[in-house]
Image (cartoon, rainbow, N blue to C red):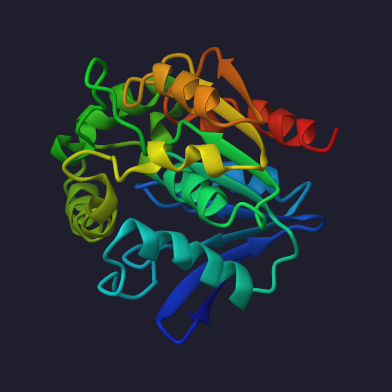
Amino acid sequence: MQSHMVDIAGRHQVEVHQGGHGRDLLFMHGAGGVFPNDPFLARLERDFRVTVPLLPGFGASDSAEPLRTMLDFTLFGFDCWEALGLDDPIVVGHSMGGMIAAEMAAVSNMAVHRLVLINAAGLWLDEQPVEDLFAKLPFELPELLFHDPGKHAGILSPDGDLDDPEFLTEFMVMNSRRLSTAGKILFPIPERGLSERLYRIRARTQILWGRNDRLIAPVYGERFAAQIENAELTIVDQAGHMLPYEQPDAVLAAIARLHN
């Protein structure tokens, strides 16, 4: 997958990752961004022309200062769609990116025809609060994010050592920049009124949730499915919040169902 810088609507200089062939797929990433040689994106590009714009504050993208509200993040997604000339893309969002993707499908419900939400943020249930990602240190993340931390946590650090001082320094610097962006819609709680707009979604929607998601519990998937008219929910075994990396075939199968 190649990356390049793109001017988005004269407002942002954005790092965009693109690769693959076939139908356009727009992927909205989560609060962790994307990983070097990202294995999930590599799997997607076998079957689709995948486009991943990095939100301002992530990677080489510029400052997130112009993004202030949930609507700003939503319109950013559409500005990327337009600037990159995407043709009726399947819109896929993971975690925070799922929140943005759902907002896109609600705000412009005649434009988004196929939607995939993976362990999406955006709702809040007092009886099952979402864990506070902003309060976590690196060594706490594997247990929070993965069903099987021992098998998959290495993706968070190239050498697999989350206690390495060099990694910790880089993590804290990059995490501060990323979370300053993500915090605008996730902090203090990841709720910006999305539940009041889900009824507007007309897209055929696949919702996927890791059964062992310790960050955003599967009950949130049930709530999304109950409020989106054309939605199908799949709870995936042996997966946590990082479902795309633990069970990528489940995501590909869900996308395939949108073609049937």
Q: Nearer the viewer, residue 26 or 126?
A: 126
Q: Nearer the viewer, residue 235 or 222?
A: 222
Counting from the top left corner in percent of width and height, residue 235 is at 55, 16
Labels in figure, total: 0
> In the displayed structure, would residue 219 be above or below residue 208?
above
Can you tell which quarter of the image residue 170 is in? bottom left
> In the displayed structure, would residue 219 be above or below residue 135?
above
Can you tell which quarter of the image residue 156 is in? top left
Residue under the image location 70 percent in, 48 percent down: 113
Residue under the image location 67 percent in, 55 percent down: 110
Left or right of 168, for residue 110: right
> In the displayed structure, would residue 71 be above or below residue 65?
above
Counting from the top left corner in percent of width and height, residue 78 is at 54, 66
Q: Nearer the viewer, residue 248 or 77?
A: 77
Left or right of 202, for residue 100: left
Q: Nearer the viewer, residue 71 or 240?
A: 71
Residue under the image location 25 percent in, 73 percent down: 65
Counting from the top left corner in percent of width and height, residue 86 is at 70, 67
* Residue 159 visible here: no
Residue under the image location 43 percent in, 44 percent down: 99
